[in-house]
């Protein structure tokens, strides 16, 4: 009985670690889009890494990128959009 009681903290740790790993779901890929300024044209930023040679979202409470090519869709990131290079158009 004492050996089982001594193992309880270790078993609790293993159980907790197992639950933590099981609950660590990968985020589904979220699209990122920004209007080009032309009617019905959007930059497809889904696979573009933000940086000094692509685009940046500077700190602001504005929506920088959208989850869909639609102004009414949810925000993917916040900030002021700054285009720094050529970007793929949807």
Image (spheres, rainbow, N blue to C red):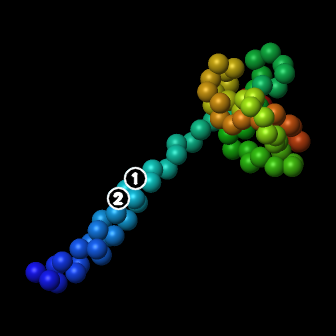
- Asked which quadrant contains residue 48, the reply is top right
Tell me, for residue 19, which label it has, or none. Answer: 2
Binning the other alpha carbons within 10 Å of mark 1 as few (below 14), some (14 to 19) or many (20 upward) gives few
Q: Is residue 10 above or below residue 81?
A: below
On the question of residue 88 being in view, the answer is no
Mark 2: few, some, or many residues within 10 Å (few <14, many ≥20)? few
Q: Quadrant of residue 46?
A: top right
Q: Which residue is mark 1?
A: 23
- Residue at the location (30% across, 75% down)? 10
The reply to whether the C-beta atoms of the residues labelled 1 and 2 are less than 8 Å apart is yes
As helix, strand or loop, the secondary structure at mark 2 comes to helix
Tell me the distance, in whole angstroms, between the alpha carbons under discs 1 and 2: 6 Å
Q: Secondary structure at mark 1?
A: loop
For the residue pair 23 and 28, the one nearer the viewer reads as 23
> Image height check: is 24 above or below 45?
below
Where residue 28 appears, as percent x and y from the top left, is: 52, 42
Instruction: Please identify the quadrant where the N terminus is shown.
Output: bottom left
Between 4 and 35, the one lying in front of the other is: 4
Residue drawn at the location 78% of the way across and 34% of the way down: 60
In the rendered image of this protein, does residue 48 appear above or below residue 18?
A: above
Residue 58 spot, x, y in % from top left: 82, 40
**From the viewer's perspective, is 84 left or right of 68?**
right
Give me the residue at 23% from left, 78% from top: 7
Most extreme residue toward the bottom is 3
């Amino acid at each position: 009985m004492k050996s089982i009681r001594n193992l309880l903290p270790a078993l609790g740790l293993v159980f907790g670690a197992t639950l933590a790993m099981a609950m660590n779901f990968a985020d589904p890929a979220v699209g990122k889009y920004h209007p080009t300024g032309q009617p019905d044209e959007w930059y497809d930023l889904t696979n573009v890494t933000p940086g000094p040679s692509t685009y940046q979202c500077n700190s602001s409470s504005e929506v920088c990128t959208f989850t869909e090519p639609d102004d009414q869709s949810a925000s993917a990131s916040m900030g002021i959009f700054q285009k720094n290079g050529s970007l793929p158009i949807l």
